[in-house]
Image (cartoon, helix red, strand yellow):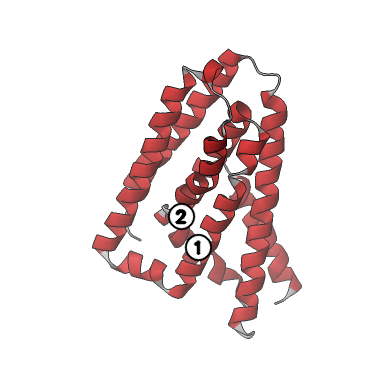
Amino acid sequence: MPLELWLSFCLASLLIIVSPGPAVALLVTTGVNRGRRAALAMLPGFFLGDLLAMTLSFAGVGALLMASAELFQLFKWLGAAYLLYLGIKMWREAGQLGELQPTGADIRLGTAKAFLVTALNPKSLAFFMAFMPQFVAPSQPLLPQLAILFSTFLALGVLSDLAFTFLATSGGRVLSARLRRILHRTGAGSLIGASALVAAMRRP
């Protein structure tokens, strides 16, 4: 694909990836309060969730969700319910932060939790359907271009997640328990807010 088109895609993707959202809120809050190992355990989940959303959007599932009111509503409410569950759970945890420890169970569940936050968001499918085709050159073969776009977006996502993890875990060491509780509740509020936004979504 043309170099200038790829560079435009990189810039647009980076701006989208680093913008705050439920995934960033979950990653930063986990890093501050549970440590670097627990935050790093989430990265494969975000990677696989994005990969699944991109694959399904280009396989036609995204178009099916946009066309079928029933499927869209089902997917939307599943995603909203899971984000709400995580937000309420994190809010309740904030009052016990002094007692929380990064256990093996938390780390093992990190990947699954991150995957579900990404994969159960109908905005992901709609986003990839609307975003990526703008950077496909019609005169060039489709599959090689999709491979370049997929790998570029995923690589930028991993780098961004690593940066957020490093910043969160480095800063978390110097934060007081009170500030960590406030940050934890801020992350919980972000997830609850994201749940409300997903629930209010309408089909394009």
Mark 2 closeness class: few <14, some 14–19, many ≥20 residues within 10 Å: many
Which quarter of the rendering shows the C terminus?
A: bottom left
Q: Which residue is mark 2?
A: 119
- Provide the secondary structure element on which disc 1 rests: helix
Query: How far is disc 2 from disc 1 in space, using C-alphas?
Result: 7 Å
Q: Mark 2 or 1 closer to N-term?
A: 1
On the rendered structure, is 116 left or right of 31?
Answer: left
State if disc 1 and disc 2 touch (CB < 8 Å): yes
Mark 1 closeness class: few <14, some 14–19, many ≥20 residues within 10 Å: some
Q: Which residue is mark 1?
A: 52
Where does the image place residue 7, in percent across and percent down from the top left?
72, 64
Where does the image place residue 51, in percent across and percent down from the top left?
55, 62
Q: Identify the residue at image location x=33%, y=43%.
A: 81
- Check disc 1 and give the amino acid type: Leu
Q: Identify the residue at image location x=69%, y=70%.
A: 5
Q: Nearer the viewer, residue 179 or 20?
A: 179
Q: Identify the residue at image location x=46%, y=55%.
A: 119
Q: Nearer the viewer, residue 60 or 27?
A: 27
**Residue 98 visible from this viewpoint:** yes
- Check disc 2 and give the amino acid type: Ala
